Amino acid sequence: MIVRTLGIIALLALASGAQPNMDLPRFQVDPFWPKPLPNHWILGAVAGVAVDASDHVWITHRPSTLQPNETRSIWRAAPPVLELDQAGNLLSSWGGSGAGYEWPQLEHGIYVDARDNVWLGGGGDKDAQILKFTRDGRFLMQIGHQGKNGGSNDTQNLGGAANMIVDEAARELYVADGYVNHRVIVFDADSGAYKRHWGAYGKRPDDGWFTRAGEKLPGPFNGAVQNENRPSQYDPKGPPPEQFRIVHAVRISHDDLVYVCDRTNDRLQVFRKDGTFVKEAFIAKDTFGSGSVWDVAFSNDARQTYLTVIDGTNQQVYIVRRETLEVISAFGHAGHWAGEFYGAHNLAVDSKGNLFITETYEGKRIQKFLRQ
């Protein structure tokens, strides 16, 4: 058996001949994590990962993306929500259609808050809802309704919500919204009441900008294959886009800054919690198609010195200095062996600084990278 291990191997921003910074995060893939699933279960495209307060790893995957030849024998799709322990053992599983809520067409994004509530989004063209469950899968609340999206200034419905996070102190839910809409929107995490929203640079989002610019709006997406017409393209040599395109992730730092992944604009934008724009940075700016800034996570030191950004187009993991938003190192290789990526989609960090990275398209897995 061939086992490949990867560490951070490229120090991109260091001058030639400079000594490597030994404080930089370094990682090595664990090729034996997770353990095989029971019941002849297999995963479709894995479109979300979260780590809870007990360091359990939660994923959501898309059973509908499994091909007929994958399930026509003894194998079948696992339930859409899975909980794993640090050793990679399955602890619980649930999800799918049920009474009182609208399960998404296309599972996308998962978050577990400090009260052990599990939040789920949906990236389908009709997915206009966020769902809230207990950790054992009991339904608690739905925000928005399937097929009811009224655009990026609709305060009651979502538009392809990609990911979310709860600000525990304020009990506010921040949503990266998303695949059809072009904004961050904030709700009360307990009541679901609308609080505020904003687009790129903290301005009111303008969906008409895309048609006025002669660009195609996002269309239906089945999640199984990459569609280069989704969403609109941008010009890396032109001025920075005035609007978000795919708002793919939102995270909040210890110092109360909000980091937003504008995936297909190849950029990370930073805000205060009220939506005031702070700064932005482009990463792999010449990336077209599905873009380069898919998800972001913070290093686990008190100051959260580094960001980890994943790029599922170039199959790269970037280490970014948070203060300057400068890419200082990267690793990654396209492929299906341990430590390689095909459609690196989401990531989460546990209390020890280990990375968990999911893969969509035909990657269909989660990998663990141990902090060295």
Image (cartoon, rainbow, N blue to C red):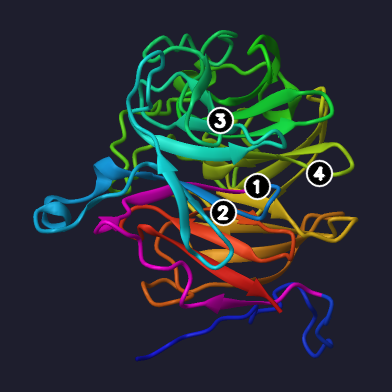
For the magenta stretch, what is the residue range?
24-51
In terms of sequence position, does the residue under pointer 2 or pointer 4 come before the other? 2
Q: How crowded is mark 2: few (under 14 residues within 10 Å), some or many (20 or more)?
A: many
Mark nearest the camera among 4 and 3 is 3
In terms of sequence position, does the residue under pointer 1 or pointer 2 come before the other? 1
**Rendered position, 174 above or below 63:** above
Residue 253 is marked as 4
Q: Residue beneath label 1, please?
A: 52
Kindly identify the residue that appears in the image at 64 percent across and 46 percent down.
Answer: 267
* Residue 41, horizontal then vertical, whole percent: 28, 55
Name the amino acid type tagged 2. Val
- Whether label 3 touches label 2, CB < 8 Å: no
Can you say which quadrant of the picture contains the C terminus? bottom right
Q: Nearer the viewer, residue 103 or 109?
A: 103
Kindly identify the residue that appears in the image at 37 percent across and 25 percent down.
Answer: 103
In terms of sequence position, does the residue under pointer 3 or pointer 1 come before the other? 1
Instruction: Tell me, yes or no, if residue 265 can be seen here.
Output: yes
* Residue 26, horizontal then vertical, whole percent: 70, 76
In terms of sequence position, does the residue under pointer 4 or pointer 3 come before the other? 3
Name the amino acid type tagged 4. Ser
Q: Residues within 10 Å of mark 3 (few under 14, many from 20)?
A: some
Residue 287 is marked as none
Can you say which quadrant of the picture contains the N terminus? bottom left
In terms of sequence position, does the residue under pointer 3 or pointer 2 come before the other? 2
Q: Nearer the viewer, residue 294 or 84?
A: 84
Name the amino acid type tagged 1. Asp
Q: How far apart are marks 3 and 1 (CA)?
A: 13 Å
Kindly identify the residue that appears in the image at 46 percent across and 47 percent down.
Answer: 92
Position of 201 with respect to 158 (left or right) is right
Q: How far apart are marks 4 and 3 (CA)?
A: 25 Å
Q: Residue beneath label 2, please?
A: 57
Q: Nearer the viewer, residue 62 or 245?
A: 62
